Amino acid sequence: DAGVTQSPTHLIKTRGQQVTLRCSPKSGHDTVSWYQQALGQGPQFIFQYYEEEERQRGNFPDRFSGHQFPNYSSELNVNALLLGDSALYLCASSLSGAETQYFGPGTRLLVL
Amino acid sequence: GEDVEQSLFLSVREGDSSVINCTYTDSSSTYLYWYKQEPGAGLQLLTYIFSNMDMKQDQRLTVLLNKKDKHLSLRIADTQTGDSAIYFCAERKGQNFVFGPGTRLSVLP
């Protein structure tokens, strides 16, 4: 049984570009959350998707948007990249109503 | 305060016990978690506890909760070199998990 998977593993972009990150949840899970982890810090909640809609959002600008597909997989899109967007982006999946969420290995984004 | 807080560093000798501490913010009922992150990897769920419990034990891991002081601790018995990692405390707020800054545990031979 595959756990949470993310692609790509690493990505380099330049300021002003746009990026799309992908996540496939653990089998049987229907909820996907995205986190940003800057170097040396804990993960910060970006948003959560359930039933193809954004259910809750953290304190991130509108440049950060997402999508969830009917198969529960999800994308995170970031527009107009800034140097400060360089971070590890983590996806976590869960079954709605469950206590726990499980994280993928992350996508490391470097913005030059 | 509004943040989950942790001490940033802990160093122990192999075979000793490690105790990692955390203070959280929400006085209402909630779930509290410990995650482990190894270099270049995602977060691995170690254990979690509901805030109406005082203690939870799972093999070498013991979680203690002092609800009055909003203090959570993780004790690792017989610490091994493979336990070297960053440990994050998190509290659940709605659909969001709020994480502390992480404690870097170094295990010395």
Image (spheres, rainbow, N blue to C red):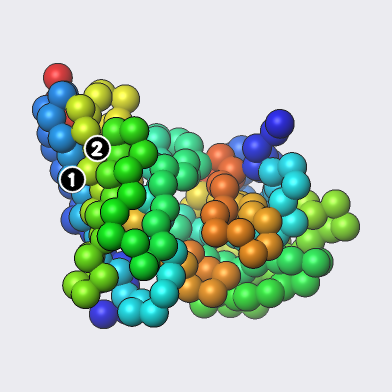
Q: The disc numbered 2 marks a residue on which chain?
A: B
Q: Which mark is residue B30?
A: none
- Determine whether A57 is above or below B33 in the image: below
The part of the image, by quadrant, that contains residue B33 is bottom left
Q: Is residue A67 left or right of residue A76?
A: right
Q: Residue at x 79, y 61 (%)?
A: A68
- Determine whether B93 is above or below A70 in the image: below
Disc 2 marks a residue whose amino acid type is Ile
Q: Nearer the viewer, residue B47 or B25?
A: B47
Residue on which the image places disc 1: B19
The part of the image, by quadrant, that contains residue B61 is top left
Q: Residues within 10 Å of mark 1 (few under 14, many from 20)?
A: some
Q: Residue at x 57, y 48 (%)?
A: A102
- Determine whether A28 is above or below A17 in the image: above
Q: Nearer the viewer, residue B73 or B82?
A: B73
Q: Kindly check if marks 1 and 2 are in contact, taking CB atoms under 8 A apart as contact.
A: yes
On the image, the x and y values in percent for residue B108 come to 14, 25
Q: The disc numbered 1 marks a residue on which chain?
A: B
Q: Residue furthest right?
A: A70
Quadrant of the image for the N terminus of chain A?
A: top right
On the image, the x and y values in percent for residue A82 come to 54, 64
Pointer 1 and pointer 2 on the same chain: yes
Q: Is residue B42 left or right of residue A1?
A: left
SS of the residue at dot 2? strand
Q: Nearer the viewer, residue A33 or A83?
A: A33
Disc 1 marks a residue whose amino acid type is Val
Q: Which mark is residue B76?
A: 2
On the image, the x and y values in percent for residue B2 come to 32, 79
